[in-house]
Image (tube, rainbow, N blue to C red):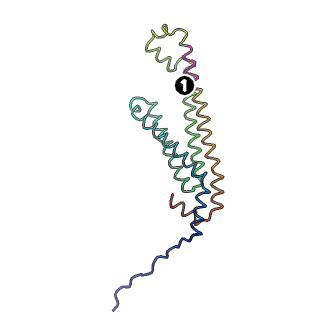
Amino acid sequence: MMAGTENTEATPQITVTPAMQQEVAAARKRRTKIDRAAGVASFNGWCAAILAAISLPFAFFSPTSAVAAAVLATTAFIEFRGRRMLRALDTRAPVLLACNQFAFGAIIVAYAAWNIYLVKHGQGGYADVIAQHPELSDALGPLGAMIQKMEALTYCLLMLGTLLFQGGTGVYYLTRRRYLREYLAETPEWVTQMLRAAA
């Protein structure tokens, strides 16, 4: 009587020809703009992560620092996720990254606008210091009004910088959609699958 038979069929092996290697190499060169966007996402992610780590120790003593740490950590997480999606040629990545930058920028602008409002109504950082040390008001004299103006100007510059950087970065991410779609349209599916697997 025969014992149980074993499946001896070998898994077919794919032979990579020189022509296929050239196709893959050409595809890697064509995705330079996509890889550059992934590098931008990586840079932004690490910057946000480092700032979140710096803010974390202060989160135990200040609600504002706690919120800042949470926002920065979330921003970093989404940037890193978007980077992985770009490397995997996921067409959803540019929109995800752009929305992340727009949301982050909106939070900063709202924070700056609120602080400008407080300064204009005598409740800013300078006002808090004077409330704790009233003697400084007489010592500073006319400089007090100048300090308040500089405080408001600082938040105005923060708003402007945020609009330029976060807004510009978000628009940059959105422009990558066209390059990603064009890349997928002109790249053979088997090459795309290979590059996704290696991402």
191, above or below 125, in the image: below
Picture quadrant where residue 4 is located: bottom left
Q: Amino acid at mark 1?
A: Asn
Q: Nearer the viewer, residue 30 or 167?
A: 30
Q: Position of residue 165 (x, y in %)?
A: 59, 37
SS of the residue under disc 1: helix
Main secondary structure along the magenta-highlighted residues: helix
Q: Which region of the structure is painted magenta?
A: 145-155
Name the residue at the bottom extreme.
Answer: 1
**Drawn side of residue 142 relative to residue 69, left or right:** right
Disc 1 crowd rating (10 Å Cα; few below 14, some 14-19, many 20+) is: some
> Looking at the image, which is closer to me, 178 or 127?
178
What residue is drawn where x is 60% and y is 42%? 170
Residue 193 x, y percent position in the rendering: 55, 63
Residue positioned 63% across, 58% down in the render: 183
Up/down of 103 relative to 127, above or below: below
Is 63 positioned to the left or the right of 150 in the image?
Answer: left
Q: How many marks?
A: 1
Nearest the eye: 82 or 23: 23
Residue 13 position in % (x across, y down): 49, 74
> Viewer-proximal residue, 32 or 110?
32
Specify the quadrant that holds the N terminus.
bottom left
Left or right: 84 with respect to 23?
left
Question: For mark 1, what is the residue?
Answer: 115
Q: Within the magenta stretch, is there residue 80?
A: no
- In the rendered image, residue 16, in percent from the top left (x then y), is placed at 54, 71
